[in-house]
């Protein structure tokens, strides 16, 4: 199967159309085997879904054979869940993310397991904090630095949830943790986002004081 780094290099989440083109091109590369092309196809489906072409993305995912490679099945569950969530059906996405988290854990696919828990925190809005805590606990126990990078997004997401809920002091703690993890394993963009969140939260706290 492909390393997450390989998929990261093809993704540009700010330009899903560009990502779509990259994944389509990669799928024609003879250097990839059938399983790897299937894995690339799951990400092509995601890129198409991010452009709002939900039916097209769903049909593409339907055509991917995951019978012989359970990791691809986990990715399909994740992307089907993301499609449902983006299309305004988060409650329908929750059981798919739950299944993806369980399968990812059983397979030792830590990155995907944490991704599924992170998506549960988004889709299952009534339990956002508990799902995020579960994801943080999972990611903190993993050695892989790419999986560890989830710590940045998770602390950041929890911080903004607390911020919006008026829990500004607690939010600041989460933003500071996000910054610490961003400096350890994150990207420059994540470091910038963490600093901006801290600055906004600090301003809010000063105004409240």
Image (cartoon, grey):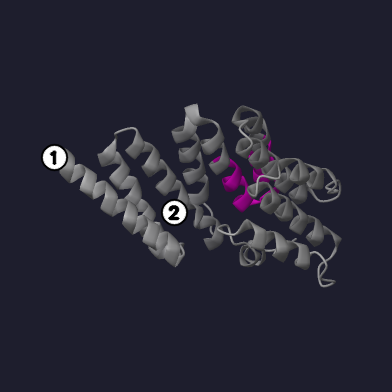
- On the rendered structure, is 112 left or right of 65? left
Q: CA distance from mark 2 to mark 1?
A: 28 Å
The residue nearer to you, when weighing 107 against 71, is 71
Residue 7, position as x, y percentages in the image: 66, 62
Q: Residues within 10 Å of mark 1 (few under 14, many from 20)?
A: few
Q: Is residue 11 above or below residue 159?
A: below
First to last magenta residue range: 99-117
Give the residue number, with chain letter if any, for mark 2: 152
Give the residue number, with chain letter if any, for mark 1: 209
Q: Quadrant of residue 4?
A: bottom right
Residue at (29, 46) in percent of width and height: 172
- On the rendered structure, is 142 left or right of 200? right
Residue 93, position as x, y percentages in the image: 65, 33
Residue at (41, 41) in percent of width and height: 158
Q: In this orientation, does residue 157 appear?
A: yes
Q: Residues within 10 Å of mark 2 (few under 14, many from 20)?
A: many
- On the rendered structure, is 108 left or right of 195? right
Residue 31, position as x, y percentages in the image: 82, 72
Kind of element beneath mark 2: helix
């Amino acid at each position: 199967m492909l390393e997450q780094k390989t998929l990261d290099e093809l993704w540009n989440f700010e330009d899903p159309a560009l990502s779509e083109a990259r994944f389509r091109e990669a799928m024609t590369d003879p250097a990839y085997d059938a399983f790897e092309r299937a894995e690339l196809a799951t990400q092509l489906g995601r890129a198409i879904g991010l452009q709002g072409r939900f039916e097209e993305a769903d049909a593409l995912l339907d055509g991917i054979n995951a019978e012989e490679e359970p990791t691809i099945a986990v990715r399909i569950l994740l992307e089907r869940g993301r499609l449902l969530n983006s299309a305004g059906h988060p409650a329908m996405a929750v059981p798919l993310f739950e299944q993806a988290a369980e399968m990812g854990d059983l397979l030792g696919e830590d990155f995907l397991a944490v991704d599924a828990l992170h998506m549960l925190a988004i889709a299952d809005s009534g339990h956002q904090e508990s799902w995020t805590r579960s994801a943080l606990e999972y990611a903190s126990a993993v050695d892989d630095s790419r999986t560890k990078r989830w710590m940045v997004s998770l602390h950041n997401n929890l911080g903004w949830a607390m911020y919006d809920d008026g829990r500004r002091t607690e939010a600041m703690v989460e933003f500071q943790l996000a910054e610490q993890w961003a400096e350890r394993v994150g990207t420059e963009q994540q470091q910038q986002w963490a600093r901006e969140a801290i600055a906004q939260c600090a301003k809010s706290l000063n105004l409240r004081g």
